[in-house]
Image (tube, coloured by chain):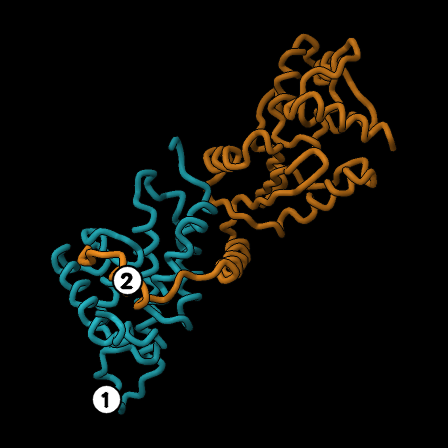
Amino acid sequence: MTGKQPFEQLVSQHGPAVLRVCRAVLGPVDADDAWSETFLSALQAYPQLPADANVEAWLVTIAHRKAIDIIRQARRTAVPVADVAVVAAPDDRDLDLPGSLARLPERQRFAVSYHYLAGLPYAEVAAIIGGTADAARRAASDGIANLRKTHGTVR
Amino acid sequence: MIMTTQDQDQHLADLFPPPPPDDVMAALHARLTVQAEAAGLLDVAYRTLDTPVGTLLLAATPAGLVRVAYEREGIDTVLERLARQVSPRILHAPQRLDGAARQLEEYFGGRRQRFDLPLDLALASGFRRSVLSYLPAIGYGHTASYQSVATAVHNPRAVRAVGTACATNPLPLVIPCHRVIRADGQLGAYLAGPEIKHQLLDLEAAV
């Protein structure tokens, strides 16, 4: 590679995986908006991206920030202050996530999505969600164990 | 990976949302091009166009049409070069090329003799650029020799450089380098091959 790929290539190569990650983290309702905002921000920043950067990790990092924004927004707007039970619930029920993923704690959901869906190594996952690579590995494996428990057909 | 068998991987995959279908991605892509254009981030828009001389790549900056390329140059190669020479903010966004595509279709249908499009000559500089700026003066159905073009741009000895300017024309067809031929009446070279040059001059002579 002598130069940067046309941005169109990024969209066709990584667009489907990033959407899948957005859906796993946010659910189908908010995923499209997160995807659009991710790729628009990426397009803006792309000329400054170092040529040897891991493009997929970069895109997932941007998507993660967008997801956090959307989750915060959802909590602010959808949760009545008096409803203590909902405030205490860790499961982002207003995000309309697919069943078993919705029951995962947020950190596990991120770790599972970024490692198993986006295929990022744990060092990259840790860079995105914070903490060490080992902690990211534990979060992902706890997440998988939880998914197995709640997902009846999985042995 | 904590998974050991493909069977288990399949079960794991069932836990996640399925890969999005193509039409979903196409809709998101279309939305992205509109948002990118509105935000002033679409530095290069492109599309392809099927024509009697093969598939063409058309690319435009906000200033105008910046590149027309024949398939034999390699669509991907041309896009990579645009990423380097103009900007990597490139998206497949046909709407910006609607005018160019329509005028080229009219040209190939014998219904258009001159192009009326904003052009971006960013990919040509110096002497090449002055040659390219002159070429539209050679009217539809007419030809001029490399020598006469060199004279017209006030550099009568630069005959070979005129040839180079034609061979590296970033906007073939729209800037009619196919109308520049040898002084002895032979057609000479063309960036898409001499047979295409022949075909274009035939098309223009037939009307």
For residue A140, side relative to residue B156 (left or right): left
Q: Could you tell me which secondary element the residue under label 1 belongs to? A: helix
Asked if the residue at tag 2 contacts the one at tag 1, i.e. Cβ–Cβ closer than 8 Å, the answer is no
Q: Nearer the viewer, residue A33 or B66?
A: A33
User: In the image, which disc is placed on residue A113?
Assistant: 2
Q: How many C-alpha atoms fall within 10 Å of the one at disc 2: few (<14), some, or many (≥20)? A: many
For residue A47, side relative to residue A142 (left or right): right
Does residue A153 sit above or below B149 in this rendering? below
Letter of the chain shown orange in the rendering: B
User: In the image, which disc is placed on residue B127?
Assistant: none
Residue type highlighted by circle 2:
Ser
Q: Is residue B21 visible?
A: yes
Which chain does the numbered disc 1 sit on?
Answer: A
Q: Which residue is mark 1?
A: A85
Residue type highlighted by circle 1:
Ala
**Residue at 67% across / 17% down in the picture?**
B189
Q: Nearer the viewer, residue A150 or A54?
A: A150
Image colour for chain A is: cyan
**Residue at 54% across / 43% down in the picture?**
B44
For residue B52, which quarter of the picture?
Answer: top right
For residue B185, side relative to residue A99 (left or right): right
Percent x, y of residue A68: 30, 67
**Residue at 60% across / 24% down in the picture?**
B168
Does residue B103 sit above or below B153 in this rendering? below
